[in-house]
Amino acid sequence: EVQLVESGGGLVQPGRSLKLSCAASGFTFSDYNMAWVRQAPKKGLEWVATISYDGSSTYYRDSVKGRFTISRDNAKSTLYLQMDSLRSEDTATYYCARRAGPFDYWGQGVMVTVSS
Amino acid sequence: IQMTQSPSLLSASVGDRVTLSCKAGQNINNYLAWYQQKLGEAPKLLIYNANSLQTGIPSRFSGSGSGTDFTLTISSLQPEDVATYFCQQYNSWTTFGAGTKLELK
């Protein structure tokens, strides 16, 4: 059974950093591109970043370029999102998702609140 | 690519045939997915490539359309189908629609 379990969320002040993790199991992690998708409270879904299966390529939405870094450790079957210079508009539930064209499996999500 | 969903809110009765619409700002070559999100849960993939049913999804869900106009149909609405439904294009980068909230009448 495919499982994706996020961790690392919480309350953080504007301008500070936070690192999210996503532990994957039930499939060969190194075979798949992976992504982070976020959802602000009572809002829609917004793609954040994607990383290729081997980590060689990364892609970001414009609003997080230069502030967020997606990475992966295939030996540990874990996906990461380093978030620096956080802003109030980054407040959201962050989901990791397996990218197979569409996002075919999602984690349960982790809440990030940016507030002073 | 902008994705426009309609209606934003839909009320229907158990057993009704329900149709949700999603329009893309340009041709997306059928790289269109539909997701169901129940309150407090993660999204779940229902349909991919416009009309392919994801494994494990009930056959009352179906997708159709091509080019820029797409439809998700629930043939006979069940109480457990109450949720918000999002469409997503993955032809060029990826973008989601704003969602259709489906409630029981």
Image (tube, coloured by chain):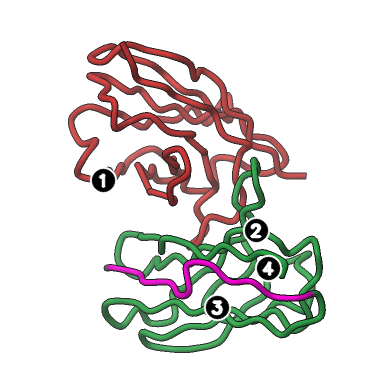
Q: Give the label on residue B83, or none.
A: 2
Q: How far, Cα to Cα, is label 3 from label 2?
A: 12 Å
Tell me where the magenta segment starts and ends, as one range.
B2-13
Q: Residues within 10 Å of mark 2 (few under 14, many from 20)?
A: many
**Residue depicted at 50% across the width and 61% down the height:** A102
Q: Give the label on residue B20, or none.
A: 3
Q: Which residue is mark 1?
A: A61
* Picture colour for chain B: green
Q: Give the label on residue B54, or none.
A: 4
Q: Nearer the viewer, mark 2 or mark 4?
A: 2
Q: Secondary structure at mark 2?
A: strand
Q: Looking at numbered disc 2 in the image, what kind of residue is underneath it?
A: Ala
Q: Secondary structure at mark 1?
A: loop
**Residue depicted at 29% across the width and 26% down the height:** A88
| Residue B53 at x, y percent in the picture | 67, 74
Q: Secondary structure at mark 3?
A: strand
* Picture colour for chain A: red
